[in-house]
């Protein structure tokens, strides 16, 4: 009985120490069978938090999509700050867009036009612009912001503006109390 108590005590102490770092989640099998439990370590992508707080500080409607920006950048091997920085340049982070277009990037809107490509939602816009940059610009030789800018925009200042926002996102430190997360 003493051995059983000692083993249970050690097990409980171990579980308490390990529990904050693990998440138990149900994973549905492909065949539609009953879910199985698996244990995975919880990791937090600080780029998502950083970008979300940056966009919140600019009162951007894109703030809720920070995770999608980062996921698409990772999927397509892009700088995670590039597509948000283009949104900063083209529409003040989605605040000034053609009504109902969800187009914060000026994507498919010729210079001087009031309307062009519209997306169903922010996620669709982020995906389309990210894929367009990868497949139609970078995969065809435009590797830098300056090279992309020569094709993307008529303004010779476009690349400098995008670089400005990339640097602002990178250097951002939240100073609004509601944007600062405190974890004990």
Image (cartoon, rainbow, N blue to C red):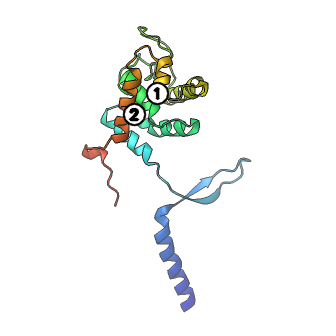
Q: Is mark 1 on a helix, strand or loop?
A: helix
State which quadrant residue 61 falls in: top left
Q: Considering the image in quadrants, where does the N terminus appear?
A: bottom right
Question: x and y percent of residue 122 in the render?
Answer: 47, 28
Q: Which mark is residue 62?
A: none
The answer to the question of whether label 1 and label 2 lie on touching residues, with beta carbons closer than 8 A, is yes
Taking the spot 28% from the left edge, 45% from the top edge, the residue there is 178
Determine whether 56 is above or below 162 in the image. below
**SS state under label 2:** helix
Residue 150 location in percent, x, y? 48, 18
Q: In which quarter of the image is residue 134?
A: top right
Indicate whether 19 appears above or below 32.
Answer: below
Residue at image coords 41%, 16%: 98
**Is 56 situated left or right of 14 in this image?**
left
Q: Residue at x 40, y 17 (%)?
A: 156
Image x and y of residue 11, in percent? 53, 77
Residue farthest to the right, as pictured:
31
On the image, the x and y values in percent for residue 70 come to 49, 39
Mark 1 residue crowding within 10 angstroms, few (<14) / some (14–19) / many (20+)? some
Judge whether residue 97 can be spotted in this image.
yes
Quarter of the image for the C terminus: give it: bottom left
Please identify, in this view, whether the residue under mark 1 or under mark 2 is nearer the observer: 1
Q: Decide if residue 57 is on the left or right side of residue 90.
A: left
Q: Residue 166 carries which label?
A: 2
In the foreground, 49 or 112: 112
Residue 145 numbered mark, or none: 1
Q: Please report the residue visible at 47 percent of the width from the left and 40 percent of the height from the top.
A: 67
- How many neighbours does mark 2 have within 10 angstroms: few (below 14), some (14-19), or many (20 or more)? many
Query: Which comes before the other along the chain, label 1 or label 2?
Result: 1
Q: Is residue 1 visible?
A: no
Q: Mark 1 to mark 2: distance in Å?
A: 10 Å
């Amino acid at each position: 009985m003493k051995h059983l108590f000692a083993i249970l005590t050690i097990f409980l102490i171990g579980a308490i120490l390990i529990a904050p770092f693990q998440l138990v989640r149900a994973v549905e099998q492909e065949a539609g069978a009953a879910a199985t439990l698996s244990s995975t370590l919880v990791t937090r992508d600080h780029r998502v938090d950083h970008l979300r707080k940056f966009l919140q500080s600019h009162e951007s409607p894109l703030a809720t999509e920070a995770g999608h920006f980062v996921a698409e950048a990772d999927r397509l091997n892009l700088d995670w700050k590039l597509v948000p920085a283009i949104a900063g340049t083209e529409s003040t982070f989605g605040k000034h867009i053609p009504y109902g277009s969800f187009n914060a990037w000026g994507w498919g809107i010729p210079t001087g036009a009031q309307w062009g490509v519209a997306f169903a939602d922010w996620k669709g816009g982020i995906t389309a612009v990210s894929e367009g940059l990868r497949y139609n610009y970078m995969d065809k030789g435009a590797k830098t912001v300056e090279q992309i800018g020569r094709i993307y925009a008529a303004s010779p200042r476009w690349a400098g503006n995008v670089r400005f926002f990339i640097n602002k996102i990178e250097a951002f430190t939240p100073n609004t109390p509601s944007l600062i997360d405190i974890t004990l």
